[in-house]
Amino acid sequence: MSAVIDWALSRNAYGRLVFATATGETFEGVVPVTAFPITAPASGVALVAHDGRELAWIDSVDNLPADIADLIKAELASREFMPEVSRILKVSSFATPSTWTVKTNRGETSFVLRGEEDIRRMGSNALLVADSHGIQFLIRDLMSLDTHSRRILDRFL
């Protein structure tokens, strides 16, 4: 079921999102911002103008017409780079800083963990690990990791 909306969303020649109101007012360079990017990435999305003003609130992207939903999902995917860790292969040391080699949904990679404070709990079973460059790695469900990965994490938590 599609939501009834009184605005339109499109891309301009430069690939930027353009928001148009029912009265014909347009805003270029609109950015979708999720309220809960980890726990509910398709719910609670604001379309924000370049000056930070909220233009529209979307309860659920899935309830929008397909063309608009696709634009928003594509924009979010390009902005919300957060690889999901499925396995911790090895760490260089149990003291920080240490280099972690992990398997993610985007392939195998290595990153430097500066300190234990860069591992944050997100709910009961999710973790967010920030590398030395500020890239966030998501462990969606701690209990779904293999025993080896959980043992490594236990040393840092």
Image (cartoon, grey):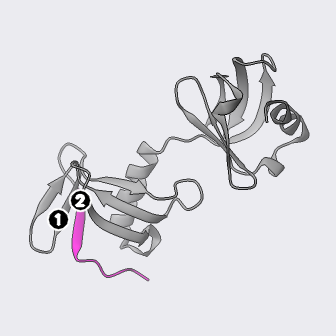
Q: Magenta span: helix, strand or loop, mainly?
A: loop
Left or right relative to 1: residue 85: right
Residue underneath mark 1:
20
The x, y position of residue 21, in whole percent, is 16, 69
Q: Secondary structure at mark 2?
A: strand
Locate residue 40, reporting x and y percent: 55, 62
Q: Secondary structure at mark 1?
A: strand
Q: Residue at x 82, y 44 (%)?
A: 145
Horizontal arrangement in the rendering, residue 68 relative to residue 78 (left or right): left
In which image quadrant can residue 119 be found? Answer: top right
Identify the residue under disc 2: 10
- Quarter of the picture containing the C terminus is top right
Q: Does residue 11 appear to the left or right of 80 in the view shown?
A: left
Looking at the image, which residue is at 44% across and 83% down? 1
Disc nearer the start of the sequence (2/1)? 2
Q: Where residue 15 sits: x, y (%)? A: 25, 45
Residue at image location 46% in from the left, 71% down from the top: 62
Could you say which is closer to the camera, residue 121 or residue 140? 121
